[in-house]
Image: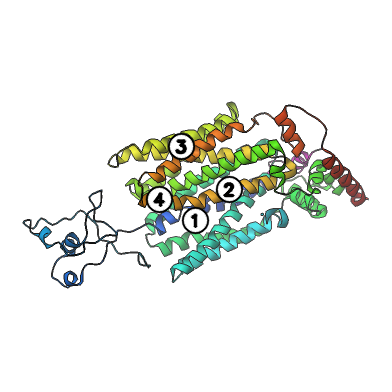
Amino acid sequence: MAFGDLLDQVGGTGRFQIVHVTLLSIPVLMMASHNLLQNFVAAVPPHYCSAHSNVSQSQLSPEEILQITVPLDHKGNPHRCQRYTAPQWHLLDKNGNVRTDYKWDKLSTWEVGSFLCPRYGRRILVLISNLLMAVSGTGVAFSTSFSMYCLFRFGCGMALSGVGLNTFSLIVEWIPTRVRTLMGTLTGYCYTVGQLILAVIAYFLRDWRWLTLAVSLPFYVFFLIAWWFHESARWLALNNKPDIAVKNLQSVAKFNGHKEEGEKINIKTLQESMKKELSSAQGSYTVLDLFRTPHMRVMTLSLSAVWLSTSFAYYGLAMDLQKFGVDIYLIQVIFGAVDIPAKIAITICMSFIGRRPSQCGALIIAGITILINLLVPLDKQTVRTCLAVVGKGCLAASFNCCYLYSGELYPTIIRQTGMGWVSMMARVGAMVAPMVLLTGDYIAWLPGLIYGGAPIISGLAGVFLPETLGVPLPDTVQDVEERGSGIRSKPSPKETVILQDTQANLLKQAA
């Protein structure tokens, strides 16, 4: 009997799984709000240098003052960061033809220019992350300085990672294998819907403090709901807590109306069903094992490139909506809605064409559309927006493929470590993305070249990954090496010793 058989014994996809997945997915709706909140709370408002003292005291209108003190930029708009060394009075001497092609807005409140999950479990970190998100988000809304704002936003970033990774783990570890792909896709759609929700909330709450508070307060409710969640029985068994694991399985069986079947489960049954995974948990595997053997090393480097570039280009597009010249609320809706057909398309491709061509194709197409956008004139906003939407959809599809593909590539014995590594690479990409935008101040086309080139390069790197469609999941590092070499042999001596030691420990505990 395998662990999946135990899940079927306690109800499989019964009432517990439905309620469990639903309650875990609801916070994902608001994750998108915090992830892309900067598009609205950190949008750069129109601003200009202060007028000369002798001009500011004159009787001129704001339009006239702006015309004689601020030059035009390359787009024909008043320059935001330059001022004439002296007032250009002659510009007013044109039969009252005053330039009015600008919008004078107030500046924002601050003036312009002025690896825990494997050790502590999933449930406790979901609790902590929800509370941290709620408290940090509230702190952002009531910040009185930019430093305080950055500090609390840093807390939101930590909470965001905790909620995302542990929610996904809790979902997939309580549902049978046959529905994991479906559940993973549906959870991904929650994030997509969350992007649409953000646009609606931001449209009606124009004040950034109220907007931040509105997307943060629900996490207090999510924190209370999270107390009901059951810790992963699989994680409990792997961390020498088989008695609690059995108790949780029996609780789930009772909730699903299979109380008698649940009572048949005991510690010995649980340990027998997870013999191979328990053997893996007893080993001293570290992140270095991701690079120690040839095929694991190539696989990890390729996946690192795929995750980093996907996140890098995704946030490079999704967090710079102002540059498209379209209403920021409308473009947020469009960028969110494109994920729906994109994720459907990538799911179909993964199922029929394979994981590798789907992953590589999504990245290469995304990169090509971003590069083509560099050749489109700035005044062709509709064309530029359409190309950006296609690119963003391909990157969203790439993200959808990343999670499933990486989980199938890494062996059970080190899968959690591998997923943690590639997730870290994605965070690095997300951190670097805003920095690349700064290069546009010196070379206007450079950010687009970098955002477009990175996915293409990583798409080519993905060619070195093995195909996993219809292939059994690897359990050990040796399985990965054999798969890469096209052979099948016995487990390595190290893994054999671990398995023997674990079996002896299981017999002692059962006795």
- CB contact under 8 Å: marks 1 and 4: no
Q: Please state the total of marks drawn on the protein image.
A: 4
Q: What residue would you read off at disc 2?
A: 425
- Determine the image quadrant of residue 58: bottom left
Among the two numbered marks 3 and 1 on one chain, the one whose residue lies closer to the N terminus: 1
Q: Which mark is residue 34?
A: 1
Q: Earlier in the sequence, mark 1 or mark 2?
A: 1
In the image, residue 331 above or below residue 295: below
Mark 2, secondary structure of its residue:
helix
SS at mark 3? Answer: helix
Q: Disc 1 to disc 4, how far (Cα)?
A: 26 Å
How far is disc 3 from disc 2 in space, using C-alphas?
19 Å
Question: Label 1, label 2: how many angstroms apart (C-alpha)?
Answer: 20 Å
Residue 7 sits inside the magenta stretch: yes
- Name the amino acid type tagged 3: Gly
Residue highlighted by disc 4: 439
The type of residue carrying mark 2 is Met
- The crowding category of the residue bearing disc 2, from other C-alpha atoms within 10 Å (few below 14, some 14 to 19, many at least 20), is many
Residue highlighted by disc 3: 367
